[in-house]
Image (cartoon, grey):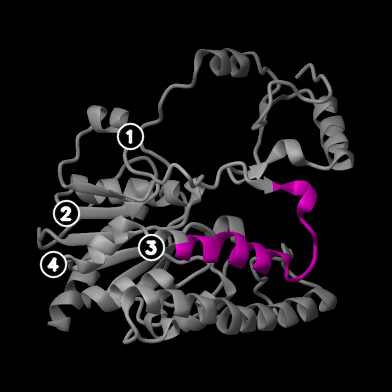
Amino acid sequence: MWQVYSFSVLILIVVFSTYCSTVNETVFVNATKSKLKILGIFGFLGKSHFDVFKPLLEELARRGHEVTVVSYFPRTDDAKAKEPLPNYKDINLVDPEIDVYVNIVDLKQISQSLFFYMEELNILMAEVTCNTSLRHPAITELIRSDEKFDVILTENFNTDCFLGFIHRFKVPYLAFSSHQIMPWTNNDMGNEDNPSYIPIYFFGFIRPMNFLDRITNTVGLFLYKAAYEYWFRSVHQVIANEVFGSDLPKLQKLAQQSSALLVNTHSSLFGSRPQLPNVVEIGGIHIPSKINSLPKDLTEFLDSAHDGALFFSLGSLIKSTTMPKEKLDAILKVFSSIPRKVIWKWETDELPHKMDN
């Protein structure tokens, strides 16, 4: 039985690798023409994360696979009308009382302490995600159902509580990361993460690191891994056991069963590093092959940018209007001094200071 499952996973890896090998054209190759029943589990409330996975999930459905997707971001009515995908099924986790993570990070509250990001990842995101998503009635119904799947796709981020589905359905799984690999993930995959020359995700060190950076990087890597194993996982294990049953294996053991890890990075941006064969960079997978036209006002604005344009965005999670005044003034001063047109994701109608460009 597991030989069949492993063969199915191999097919998917080939499919994903082929998908990532082209820039301007999406090409899928499925040598056996088999149709797989795929379960996608994406319980994190961050829209920017799901936007990375969505194009691949939809493409799998276009290729004839039966795709069931658990998320907070079901296909919209407009998307369904534009392109019906009858074998793409949403299990909708949307709750009117729970907001998805868009414009929620207040920059004034961000500290530079070593464990600030761990606190945010665990308390704000992971525990809320596990408690909210896993206790949703739709999740309960899925767990109790007689559904059968060939493979599971799920996000690798700040919790393993959703890996209970691996135990529930007894199938192999592939993990996705919408950004650089988290420090604890390398342990689970057996992937190289030597802190002497590989900067960890949270510090922003630039290679080559100096001696002090390497010391900080080494200590930070140890502390982050320890915090995840003995703080995050211990809490999430309790929640997962309540949902999936007391016979659920340790989450770490389930995490180590990943057949592959697909990472939204590329060496041209993040530098080269040794990777296992089943750790595959898929940077840019969310970029569509067909680009929609820009709104008229943006088109006119960019057409008039004879000296070029600069696009500045802190992402969908961060609320730019919460930026501390001294930092905002410094950025606006630089932007106003350059000849280029500037496009900035800003949450109110006007900037504090008028800029001609």
Task: Identify the residue at image location x=41%, y=59%.
Answer: 133
Q: Quadrant of the N terminus?
A: bottom left
- Foreground label between 1 and 4: 4
Residue 135: numbered disc: 3
Q: Earlier in the sequence, mark 3 or mark 4?
A: 3
Q: Against 242, is 350 above or below? A: above
Q: Position of residue 289 (x, y in %)?
A: 36, 37
Q: Quadrant of residue 65?
A: bottom left
Measure how far apart labels 1 and 4 are at the Cα level: 27 Å
From the image, tell me which residue sits under label 2: 65
Tell me the amino acid under the disc marked 3.
Arg
Q: Residues within 10 Å of mark 1 (few under 14, many from 20)?
A: few
> Sequence order check: which comes first, mark 2 or mark 3?
2
- Do labels 3 and 1 touch, CB within 8 Å? no
Secondary structure of the residue carrying tag 2 is loop
Q: Earlier in the sequence, mark 2 or mark 4?
A: 2
- Give the label, 1 or 2, closer to the camera: 1
Secondary structure of residue under mark 4: loop
Q: Is residue 352 left or right of residue 273?
A: right
For disc 1, the marked residue is: 76
Q: Is residue 128 above or below residue 64?
A: below
Distance Cα–Cα, label 2 vs label 4? 19 Å
